[in-house]
Image: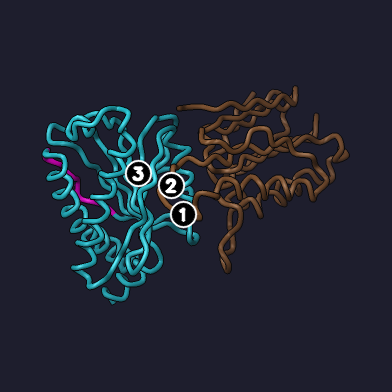
Chain colours: A brown, B cyan
Amino acid sequence: MTRHVVGIGQTAVVTDPGDTIEMIGLGSCAGIFVIAPGKIAVAAHSLLAKPRQGEVGKEPGKYVETAVPFLLEQLHGVGVPKSRCKAWVVGGAQMFTFGGDSESAGIGERNTSLAAELLRKAGLRPDTSFVGGTNARRASLDFESCEFVASTTGS
Amino acid sequence: MAAQNEYLEAYSEITNIGTGNAATALASFLHRQVHLDPPRAHEMDLFGAVELLVEESRNTSVVLLECNGDLDGLITLFIEDPAPYLEALGATPELAEPAIAEIGNIFAARFLEAIGSMLGLVGHHSPPATAVGDRSAIMQTILAMAAGAETFTLVRTLMSLEDGSSPAELVYFPGESALGHVKSLLA
């Protein structure tokens, strides 16, 4: 019975019944969860959609573009068809009220859009019910029951 | 490593000039004394920055200013309890956000002006952006905006009013241009 709290830029891979994967204080980051029921559950808490040109991401979880392939690689060969796998994308909130035109206003939206797009391209059907808005969120996935819970926090 | 430490020390000193001037301007605006600790510069990866800056589930008010020009980067001010600041300004709680924004505006303008005139550089800042809520969630956007490379350079200091009330935290993330200018001046 272990709670795997996934911090910013981190990933988690869970195979033990009774374990949960949690993300707390999700703001503009994308929280990406995928489960192959009864076999494996994986998640990433990604800060940005893509690395800057020329940057080599050492940690796959930091960027959505590297996190999604990393998560899918963990599912490879577990013997569960993609049609039975479940996926969720959470977060992508706009935490700041920007006074002028700022490209930064779209950070969260870019994160969650790319995560959903990459998961769809891989043949999954991510639930994107818990994205956007202006509030922080917390989310958890229970390995055994496959139950996924997300809620907003703060003002 | 020694050269790197020397560089971070120099950056702390340079920032100290900026925060000192900014605190004086803020004290004049608030009609209260403002106390600032000496700033300290750090260079670290994402996980180090998260460990240093991200604290779970603390409600906070934040003002953020994007800087450009020679002194590019981000200036952020975290105020846990804005009430004493609002009281000093005679502002009601409904005006908390614009009041905090104005505090950030004054701080950033004087900060950039002081560093710029000392180094012969020019920096401008954007209109302030504000957020109220979970510190960890707000910090994600700031780190995403500051994440230019594998490592973060940041300068951090704590601020309070004369009686030690309303502690606030200033975190400055110099951008590539600002870092490059300072490195070349130190070379």
Amino acid type at image mark 1: Asp
Secondary element type, mark 2: loop
User: Is B49 located above or below residue B95 in the figure?
Assistant: below
Secondary element type, mark 3: strand
A123 or B67, which is in the foreground? B67
Nearer to us of marks 3 and 1 is 1
- Give the residue at mark 3: B63
Nearer to us of marks 2 and 3 is 2
Marks 2/3: CA–CA distance = 10 Å
For the point 30% across and 49% down, the residue is B156
Marks 3/1: CA–CA distance = 16 Å
For the point 22% across and 41% down, the residue is B159
User: Is B98 located above or below residue A66 in the figure?
Assistant: above
Within 10 Å of disc 1 (Cα), the crowding (few <14, some 14-19, many 20+) is few
Secondary element type, mark 1: loop
Which of the labelled discs sits on residue A98, or is there none?
A: 2
Amino acid type at image mark 2: Phe
Amino acid type at image mark 3: Val
| Pointer 2 with pointer 1, Cβ within 8 A | yes
Q: Which residues are magenta?
A: B32-40
The image quadrant that residue B92 belongs to is: top left
The image quadrant that residue B110 belongs to is: bottom left
- Give the residue at mark 1: A101
Q: Chain of mark 2?
A: A
The reply to whether the magenta stretch includes residue B17 is no
Residue B126 position, x and y percent, is 36, 56
Q: Quadrant of the C terminus of chain B?
A: bottom left
B91 or A28, which is in the foreground? B91
Q: Is residue A43 left or right of residue A125?
A: left
Which of the labelled discs sits on residue A15, or is there none?
A: none
Marks 2/1: CA–CA distance = 7 Å
